[in-house]
Image: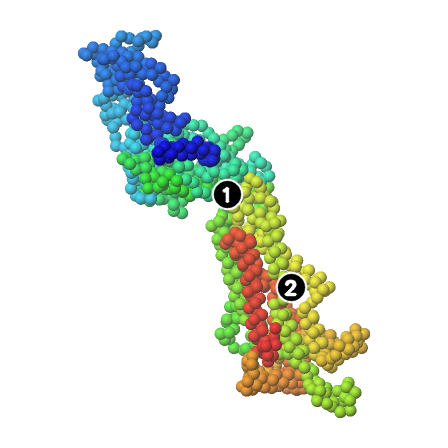
């Protein structure tokens, strides 16, 4: 009973399942069992329509491919509709199946020459017989018989490969054996030769990486036959096949009986003439070597002796392309015809048609690199195709071809040396024929399998120098091969391949002019550095040569030499930018990437030397002696009583009579802010540079492509960058934007909005504070900030009243001299004044701790006392109170302004030079805006040349200048607190 209930539940579930889970039922219909054809049994075939194994019918067995059935031996076809839809019928005992498989036939009497093979078909015993089963009209004979072919003269017939027809035997059999039977002679590659023709032929396939070789199946099967047929009969196809095997062997001369040596031996033993009078091209043989491989000699007559008649232009669409033509051969030596190199014939990397064909636009340096799988190489090149390159040109209305040389970098000489990898052109062996991929020659015995491919193919084009027609020397194809063992590497392994086109011309004259410019400008830099050193020594008060003088000379020279390197590099970049991009007939070409390395060295040296100059400038500006001279004096009691309208002084009034220090602190903080201001905004300048280079497209002018365009041409988007052009474009944009920004800042911003340098001078006057700066021991700058109103600590009413007086010219001028407005001076101090200043300044300022204690109060009192002594001394000095330390005010002579050097030495009196140009900005970044601009430009360009990334260069340059600005302010603030005796806690 329980079993019946269970069976009922199962049946109910089975009935309800399609309705409860319809999606699972539908999905089940798409499930297929995985079955491989190799898993089918010997009497089964794999049905490609059902993806399952099906049994073969009666009297049938699986075909070799496993996808259909065939009749078993002893069975004939009765019906055949393809696949497994056949019907087989058994033959009677003693009968065999005919060759076509449709009938049964007796094989003749036992004493006849016929026999039944294991496959159930008749065959003849003798090799020179054919099997006859039907009459000429196709009627089946009662018995199969054997017919002897006539191999003797007048007939010369022999069974064909199917042994059902007597065919004419080859000429080699007729000539060598005088018969179709070559059993007593030598058979090679299907040809018959006399025994004396049997010579040694190496069947080794040389490796590229090791001085060893593997046995090549292709060479073993075809080399001897090709040699004998070429040597004995001058068979064109055999000779071409022999040349192909020489190319497969990389033109190697290491094996004495290799294909290349065999080809050379046949050529030298020939007594005939040479094709086109070329010594290395015997008549009837392929032209494999451009120059003689055993005595190569100098290749310059081949590469540089003759200028091709082609003229190239950047504007004419017909004359702006390299028309390279390829003669093609298959591996058997058959000529496949001519074809243009366009369309990627020489490029293994796949790409768009425009990118591929842009390789042959004249003057465009082209680079293409990719990773490609081994399976793709095998599928695209199952057998190698051999090429001979030509350059097409027109002369007198007739098209001609010029044979181009090929430099195989993997060619071995007889000693196993890669002679073509050296720079000595006298040892180069140039070839004519090459291949791209070889998947046949490396098939070895018993199991080696090497795949050889071109890993690098370069076309070098050299322009004829000193011409205006745009002619070239014969281009050179340079190839480097690599090989991979397919036994160890999978078919999905990736290999790197590259293709490039390089243009060059002799740059000796340009390099000589560059060297002359460096020598001349470098000599001027030495003289200028000596002049600056002399000026520095005079300002330092030195009379004897010492180590600091030598160090400063080297630093001055480093900065000037950086300018020299920059000027030469900038001139070079600008020259190529103008003349290379503005030519119709191509007469000049850019230096090669190797020749550009000297240019990169110049720019890098300029950056390194300029960096030393910036470090020196940083140390110089953050270590100057500076003091804020306060002219403010305490008010007397009468002034205080008059202002307060009181009859006696209270405690508050007495406190009012003290001098406020806040004016000095305010001027000191303004000086700190002034230290890093410049005539341009670095961030804005960098943004504008990136905008013009990348957004507007000036960067595209740096392409190695002779047509000037801000937009990259669609057919040259694979062109690479030129470092020289890139530097020329970047520096031109940088300099133009820099000087434009500096000019707008000087002419517009400072004149109509604000001039921070003049504002600082005005602030000093309103604060009644002067500034004395010593950049050198005996030289510095003075800002006269003494108020014409006698007081700077004034109320708001007094301030406005004083300003109104100045506007109405009801007060004296602000200058140091009466009726003079000049407030800034260059100061050359006497020895006495400097000694007195240093004596007072010997007590260094001590940093006051944040919380005062007894010891800290003593430090504060010491600093205050030193401040008051220095303030009184400098006030008295300016007021001519010291007769032995007096000074005179004068203008600098024109020569002194040009040389930036004081000719007159201040022996007894100090010299104050009127300086309306505010030269004190030299101790600020403001006075060195051009130097900083040049350093940032060099940094930007060097980073860009190294990375080819403008954005990265911009980011690094911005953060570098920001870091320098932060360091500048920090060190400047520290020096200001130390030298001015102003408490650092009040410096913001």
Toward the viewer: 869 or 645? 645
The quarter of the displayed image where residue 318 is located: top right
Image disc number at residue 679: 2
Q: Is residue 83 left or right of residue 909?
A: left
Q: What residue is disc 1 on? A: 366
Residue at 71% across, 87% down: 652
Q: Does the image show residue 513?
A: no
Mark 1 Cα shell of 10 Å, populated few (<14), some (14-19), many (≥20)? many
**Furthest residue in direction bottom, as rendered:** 648
| Contact (Cβ within 8 Å) of mark 1 with mark 2 | no
- The residue drawn where x is 79% and y is 75% is 804
**Mark with earlier residue (1, 2):** 1
Could you say which is closer to the camera, residue 631 or residue 9? 9
Q: Residue at x 67, y 78 (%)?
A: 663
* Label 2: element kind: loop
Q: Residue at x 63, y 70 (%)?
A: 673
Quadrant for the C terminus in the image? bottom right
Q: Residue furthest front?
A: 1
Q: Is residue 649 visible?
A: yes
The extreme left residue here reads 111
Q: Image check: 25 left or right of 2?
A: right
- The percent position of residue 766, horizontal first and vertical second, equals 71, 76
Q: In the rendered image of this protein, does residue 82 appear above or below residue 925?
A: above
Residue 755, percent from left and from top:
69, 67
From the viewer's perspective, tell me whether residue 285 is left or right of residue 918: left
Image quadrant where one finds the N terminus = top left
Q: Secondary structure at mark 1?
A: strand
Task: Examine the image and state in which quarter residue 837 appears.
Answer: bottom right
């Amino acid at each position: 009973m329980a079993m019946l209930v269970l069976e009922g539940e199962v049946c109910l579930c089975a009935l309800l399942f399609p309705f409860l889970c319809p999606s699972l039922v539908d999905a089940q219909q798409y499930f297929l069992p995985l079955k491989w054809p190799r898993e089918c049994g010997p009497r089964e075939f794999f049905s490609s329509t059902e993806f399952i194994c099906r049994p073969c019918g009666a009297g049938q067995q699986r075909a070799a491919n496993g996808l259909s059935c065939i009749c078993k031996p002893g069975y004939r076809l009765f019906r055949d509709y393809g696949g497994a839809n056949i019907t087989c019928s058994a033959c009677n005992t003693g009968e065999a199946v005919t060759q076509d498989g449709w009938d049964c036939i007796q094989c003749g009497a036992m004493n006849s020459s016929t026999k039944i093979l294991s496959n159930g078909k008749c065959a003849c015993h003798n090799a020179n017989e054919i099997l006859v089963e039907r009459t000429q009209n196709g009627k089946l004979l009662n018995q199969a018989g054997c017919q002897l072919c006539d191999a003797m003269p007048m007939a010369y017939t022999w069974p064909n490969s199917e042994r059902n027809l007597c065919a004419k035997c080859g000429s080699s059999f007729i000539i060598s054996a005088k018969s179709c039977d070559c059993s007593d002679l030598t058979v090679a590659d299907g040809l018959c030769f006399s025994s004396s023709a049997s010579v040694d032929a190496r069947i080794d396939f040389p490796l590229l990486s090791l001085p060893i070789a593997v046995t090549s199946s292709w060479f073993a099967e075809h080399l001897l036959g090709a040699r004998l047929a070429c040597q004995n009969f001058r068979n064109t196809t055999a000779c071409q096949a022999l040349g192909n095997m020489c190319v497969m062997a990389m033109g190697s001369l290491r094996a004495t009986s290799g294909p290349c040596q065999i080809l050379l031996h046949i050529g030298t033993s020939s007594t005939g003439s040479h094709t086109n009078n070329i010594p290395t091209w015997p008549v009837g043989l392929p032209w494999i070597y451009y120059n003689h491989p055993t005595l190569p000699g100098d290749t310059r007559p081949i590469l540089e002796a003759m200028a091709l008649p082609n003229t190239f232009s950047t504007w004419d669409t017909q004359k702006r392309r390299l028309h390279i033509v390829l003669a093609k051969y298959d591996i058997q030596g058959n000529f496949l015809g001519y074809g243009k190199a366009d369309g990627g014939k020489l490029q293994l990397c796949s790409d768009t048609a425009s990118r591929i064909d842009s390789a042959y636009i004249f003057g465009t340096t082209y680079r293409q690199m990719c990773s490609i799988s081994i399976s793709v190489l095998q599928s695209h090149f199952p057998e190698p195709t051999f090429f001979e390159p030509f350059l097409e040109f027109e002369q007198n209305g007739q098209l001609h071809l010029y044979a181009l040389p090929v430099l195989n970098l993997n060619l071995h000489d007889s000693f196993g040396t890669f002679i073509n990898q050296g720079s000595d052109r006298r040892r180069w062996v140039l070839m004519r024929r090459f291949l791209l991929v070889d998947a046949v020659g490396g098939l070895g015995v018993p199991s080696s399998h090497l795949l050889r491919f071109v890993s690098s193919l370069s076309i070098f084009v050299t322009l004829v120098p000193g011409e205006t027609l745009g002619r070239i020397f014969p281009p050179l194809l340079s190839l480097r091969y690599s090989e991979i063992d397919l036994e160890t590497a999978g078919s999905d392994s990736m290999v790197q391949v590259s293709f490039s086109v390089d243009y060059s011309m002799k740059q000796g004259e340009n390099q000589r002019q560059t060297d002359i410019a460096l020598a001349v400008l470098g000599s001027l830099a030495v003289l200028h550095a000596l002049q600056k050193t002399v000026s520095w020594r005079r300002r330092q008060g030195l009379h004897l040569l010492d180590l600091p003088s030598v160090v400063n000379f080297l630093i001055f020279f480093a900065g000037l030499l950086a300018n020299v390197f920059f000027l030469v590099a900038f001139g070079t970049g600008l020259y190529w930018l103008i003349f290379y991009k503005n030519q119709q007939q191509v007469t000049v070409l850019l230096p090669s990437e190797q020749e550009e390395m000297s240019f990169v060295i110049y720019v890098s040296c300029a950056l390194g030397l300029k960096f030393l100059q910036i470090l020196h400038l940083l140390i110089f500006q953050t270590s100057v002696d500076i003091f804020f001279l306060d002219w403010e004096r305490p008010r007397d009691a009468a002034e205080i009583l008059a202002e307060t309208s009181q009859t006696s002084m209270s405690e508050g009034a007495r406190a009012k009579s003290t001098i406020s220090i806040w004016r000095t602190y305010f001027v000191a903080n303004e000086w700190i802010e002034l230290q890093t201001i410049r005539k341009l905004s670095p961030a804005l300048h960098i943004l504008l540079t990136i905008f013009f280079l990348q957004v507007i497209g000036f960067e595209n002018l740096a392409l190695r492509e002779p047509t000037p365009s801000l937009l990259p041409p669609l057919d040259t988007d694979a062109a690479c960058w030129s470092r020289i052009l890139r530097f020329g474009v970047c520096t031109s944009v940088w300099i133009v934007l820099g000087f434009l920004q500096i000019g707008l800042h000087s002419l517009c911003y400072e004149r109509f909005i604000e001039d921070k340098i003049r504002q600082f001078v005005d602030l000093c006057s309103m604060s009644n504070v002067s500034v004395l700066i010593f950049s050198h021991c005996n030289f510095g700058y003075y800002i006269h900030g003494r108020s014409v109103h006698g007081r700077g600590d004034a109320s708001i009413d007094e301030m406005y009243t004083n300003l109104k007086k100045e506007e109405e010219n009801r007060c004296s001028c602000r200058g140091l001299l009466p009726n003079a407005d000049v407030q800034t001076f260059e100061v050359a101090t006497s020895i006495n004044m400097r000694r007195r200043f240093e004596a007072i300044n010997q007590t260094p300022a001590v940093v006051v701790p944040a919380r005062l204690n007894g010891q800290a109060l003593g430090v504060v009192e010491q600093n205050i006392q030193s401040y008051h002594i220095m303030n009184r001394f400098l006030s008295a000095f300016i007021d001519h109170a010291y007769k032995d330390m007096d000074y005179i005010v004068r203008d600098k002579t024109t020569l002194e302004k040009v040389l930036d050097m004081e000719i007159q030495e201040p022996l007894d009196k100090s010299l104050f030079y009127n300086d309306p140009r505010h030269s004190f900005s030299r101790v600020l970044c403001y006075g060195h805006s051009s130097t900083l601009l040049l350093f940032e430009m060099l940094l930007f360009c060097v980073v860009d040349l190294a990375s080819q990334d403008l954005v990265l260069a911009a980011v690094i340059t911005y953060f570098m200048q920001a870091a320098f600005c932060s360091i500048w302010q920090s060190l400047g603030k520290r020096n200001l607190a130390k030298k001015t005796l102003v408490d650092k806690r009040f410096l913001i």
